Amino acid sequence: MTRAPKERIEVDDEVRVILGAMVHGGHCIAHPLGHTAFVRHGLPGEDVTLRITEVRSKFVRADVIEVHQASQFRIEAPCNWARPNGCGGCDYQHIDLTHQRELKGVIARESLQRQAGIDVGPITVLDLGDDRGLGWRTRMRWSVDGSGNAGLLGARSHGVLPIDTCLLASPEITSLQITDQDWPDVQSVQATLDSLSEVSVWADRDLVSGSRKSVQNVRHRTWQIESTGFWQVHPNAAASIVDHVLDFGAPKAGEDWLDLYAGAGLISAFLGEAVGQNGNVTAVESYRSAVRDGRRALRDLPQVKFIDSDVEQWPLPSVVDGVVLDPPRRGAGVQVMESVALAKPRVIVYVACDPVAFARDAAFLLAAGYELARFVVLDAFPMTQHMECIAKFTPIGVR
């Protein structure tokens, strides 16, 4: 199909279109006046009027401001701020929760097809025990404006909106009423909820209430981590990730494993238990407080050794039995993936929070002689476009 030639388009122009597919980032694709547009607050197939919010040389951004023919999966967003000129946190509140997961499965599948040439077939996205998709956030950060008012940021904006309640926040965090308080000379406020239902509140780097350490329980093990340090936001995510990594990797007694981007050793701990005292687990992490917390939590597992280093700068061993990677959103990159493949592990388990970055890294493994053996997507971030992917790679011909 030949696309219409581009016509002049400007911010605040309103155009009626039929929305195309949902893509990574929480947008639908559309082509107003011949331009490629990334459109928020829509659903594939809807007949809508959109308003242009940003114009670039290769694409434009837009918001749906009127729906003429709604998708059967459209619902009324539970939060009044999930709208144009509203909060930037929730991309999918206007979509039925079951269909949200279907869309995430399609996006993950298409990312693998486009970036790595892999077709995994239809994907069933697994929920983490949510039937409403609300009240799950155990970590919240508010921005503070120049008048000391705390709020949340608008979509693609540094503007602080006076959002008094986030429906994704846990009840324990909501009860703090952070936005009802004054925060003079503060840039941000952070609240974290731990496994004991204790909440810590920080204003910038100052502890306001609660403990500096958060207690996090997974299976039979306990961590005390910096309350501002990294941990999974959904209360059921950490345990589910561990379950899938152990299932996919099947670590055996006496094996040597690498846990790259190990954090405080969530996965390292259970790898260490599986390989036993005759095995080894090397946990590589650059965030020093996480390394300290991990060493303290795993002191009963001498077979687990933490390395305080950037993964990219640490020389990987020449031979290992298994590798786990849980990189930041940008992915691991070609240098790390090539080094992992050169170590010739019998299995590689990759945990990813960005399907496109994961698919790029997966392409490197395929080129190095590995194949995707198993793949699962967890809905660890309901109401948002984010997801958690877990994949198992094995040498070609070895399942």
Image (tube, grey):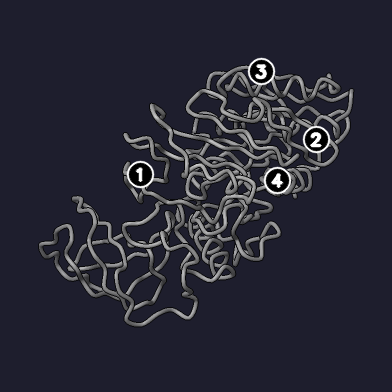
For label 4, count other residues whose C-alpha is less than 10 Å away and answer few (under 14), some (14-19) or many (20+).
many
Q: Is residue 265 left or right of residue 26?
A: right
Q: Position of residue 337 (x, y in %)?
A: 56, 34
Camera-side mark, 1 or 2 = 1
Q: In this picture, is 219 found above or below 53? A: above
The residue that label 4 is drawn on is 241
- For the residues labelled 2 and 4, the Cα–Cα distance comes to 11 Å
- For the residues labelled 1 and 3, the Cα–Cα distance comes to 39 Å
Camera-side mark, 1 or 3 = 1
The residue that label 1 is drawn on is 160
Q: Quadrant of the N terminus?
A: bottom left
The residue that label 2 is drawn on is 270
Q: Tell me which label, 2 or 4, sits earlier in the chain.
A: 4
Q: Position of residue 63 (x, y in %)?
A: 30, 63
- For the residues labelled 3 and 2, the Cα–Cα distance comes to 17 Å
Residue type at mark 3: give it.
Answer: Ile
For label 2, count other residues whose C-alpha is less than 10 Å away and answer few (under 14), some (14-19) or many (20+).
many
Q: Position of residue 231 (x, y in %)?
A: 63, 36
Residue 262, can we see it? Answer: no
